[in-house]
């Protein structure tokens, strides 16, 4: 029996594992790029936008563009830029979810990198990992907003 046939019989879904590894590496790359972007940007002096490479970026909120009123997520980008600049209190003042989202991003970077290099049995759980990631992102994003709305 050749080594190739032995290897395929012990792990018949090796190509699937490679796909999962690529998924985790891609997720890690996207999150790392986001972290670099946030660390390189700065908040405009009027706190109504961000500046990247000396250029003021337009508002990314579709709701605010269409209605003129901020949505519950407005300010998240500015808050994350402040957070990556080390200004935790200012970030939380702009958007209460910023510290939690920053923590989520750091944890996800670690989880995705670990999952990309982990043995195959760990990578088989990626749908559950993805669902939990999305659930924690949702909780980190909206629980502080809801609590602030209820308190005020």
Image: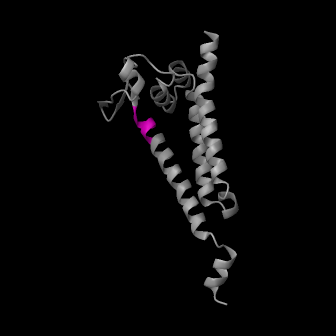
Residue 58 at x, y percent in the picture: 33, 28
Position above or below: 64 against 10: above
- What residue occupies the far front of the structure in this picture? 66
Tell me: 37 left or right of 148. left
Quadrant of the drawing holding the N terminus = bottom right
Q: Residue at coordinates 49% horizontally, 30% vertically from top-left? A: 80
Q: Residue at coordinates 62% horizontally, 42% vertically from top-left? A: 133
Residue 40 at x, y percent in the picture: 41, 37
Position above or below: 113 against 79: below
Asked if residue 39 is among those painted magenta in the image, a careful observer would answer yes
Residue 102 at x, y percent in the picture: 56, 34
Tell me: 10 left or right of 105. right
Q: Main secondary structure of the magenta part?
A: helix
- What residue occupies the far top of the structure in this picture? 152
Q: Residue at coordinates 36% horizontally, 23% vertically from top-left? A: 65
**26, 135: nearer the viewer:** 135
Residue 145 at x, y percent in the picture: 58, 21
Residue 9 placement: quadrant = bottom right
- Which residues make up the magenta segment? 36-41
Numbered disc total: 0
Residue 119 placement: quadrant = bottom right
- What residue occupies the far bottom of the structure in this picture? 1
Q: Residue at coordinates 62% horizontally, 69% vertically from top-left? A: 13
**151, 47: nearer the viewer:** 151
Quadrant of the drawing holding the C terminus = top right
Colour pattern: one colour
Position above or below: 9 against 43: below
Tell me: 85 left or right of 149. left
């Amino acid at each position: 029996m050749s080594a190739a046939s032995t290897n395929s019989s012990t792990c018949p879904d090796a190509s699937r594992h490679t796909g999962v590894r690529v998924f985790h590496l891609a997720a890690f790359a996207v999150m790392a790029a986001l972290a670099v972007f946030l660390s390189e940007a700065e908040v405009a002096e009027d706190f109504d936008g961000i500046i990247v490479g000396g250029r003021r970026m337009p508002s990314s909120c579709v709701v605010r563009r269409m209605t003129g009123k901020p949505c519950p997520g407005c300010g998240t980008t500015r808050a994350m830029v402040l957070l990556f600049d080390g200004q935790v209190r200012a970030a939380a003042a702009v958007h209460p979810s910023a510290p939690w989202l920053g923590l989520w991003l750091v944890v996800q970077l670690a989880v995705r990198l670990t999952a990309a290099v982990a043995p195959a049995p760990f990578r088989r759980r990626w749908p559950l990992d993805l669902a939990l990631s999305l659930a924690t992102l949702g909780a980190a994003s909206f629980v502080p907003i809801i609590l602030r709305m209820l308190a005020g």
